[in-house]
Amino acid sequence: MWLALRGRAKVRLPKAEPWQLLLAAVIGSVYLAPALLVPVPFDTDAQGFGLLIATVRASGSITTLAPFFPEISWFYSPGYFLLGAQLADLTGARIHEVMLGLSHVLALGVVAGVGALGQKMGGSAPGWWAAAACAGGVALLTTLLDGAYTNVYGIWLMATFLWMLDFAL
């Protein structure tokens, strides 16, 4: 990327037809608009995840609710909370803003990952159909809007792993 910015290497973007650009813009708008319009994440799941990010950020512990409730221990997959706490520290943003932004971008990553998988399996047309089916179905969007951000993170990890598995084999 550094070479591309300095002008030494040429960046070649994949050629896309106008309908493909329009579809990508619509999908991006649908999945990113709620992050910009909603003041705080919906549902009690997101509130609990925010508390866990706050405890990880304040204490560094992924097993107790210290410093708020050190006598209470919890066992949850810590990846999302560690990433959220790290992003909140690095950006200085509030936790709910980090959760909204991160999760909505991860949902777009799921759509892109499913599209890339479809393209690897069958070519350009199946890739676009897979991405459109993933984005157009209600499962991912309702999971996202329900505040099940750890599920979105897990689905993104799975789609990315399966896409990268092709390079390893």
Image: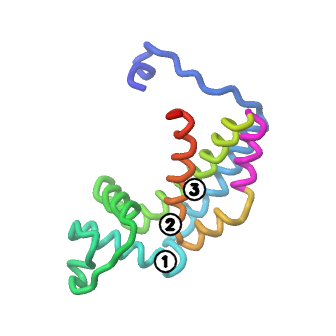
In the drawing, does residue 21 fall left or right of residue 42? right
Q: Residues within 10 Å of mark 2 (few under 14, many from 20)?
A: many
Q: Which amino acid lies under the numbered mark 1 shown in the image of this protein? A: Asp
Identify the secondary structure beneath mark 2. Answer: helix
Residue 49 image-quadrant placement: bottom left
Please report contact status of discs 1 and 2: CB closer than 8 Å, yes or no.
yes
Identify the secondary structure beneath mark 1. Answer: helix
Q: Is residue 96 magenta?
A: no
Q: Residue at (49%, 77%) from the top-left corner?
A: 45
Q: Residue at (48%, 66%) from the top-left corner?
A: 150
Q: Residues within 10 Å of mark 1 (few under 14, many from 20)?
A: some
Q: Which residue is mark 3?
A: 107
Position of 155 relative to 114 (above/below): below
Identify the secondary structure beneath mark 3. Answer: helix
In the drawing, does residue 25 fall left or right of residue 105? right
Q: Which amino acid lies under the numbered mark 2 shown in the image of this protein? A: Tyr
Position of 66 relative to 35 (above/below): below
Q: Which residue is mark 2?
A: 149
Mark 2 to mark 3 CA distance (whole Å) = 9 Å
Q: Which residue is mark 1?
A: 45
User: Residue 106, how many percent across, how many down?
Assistant: 52, 54
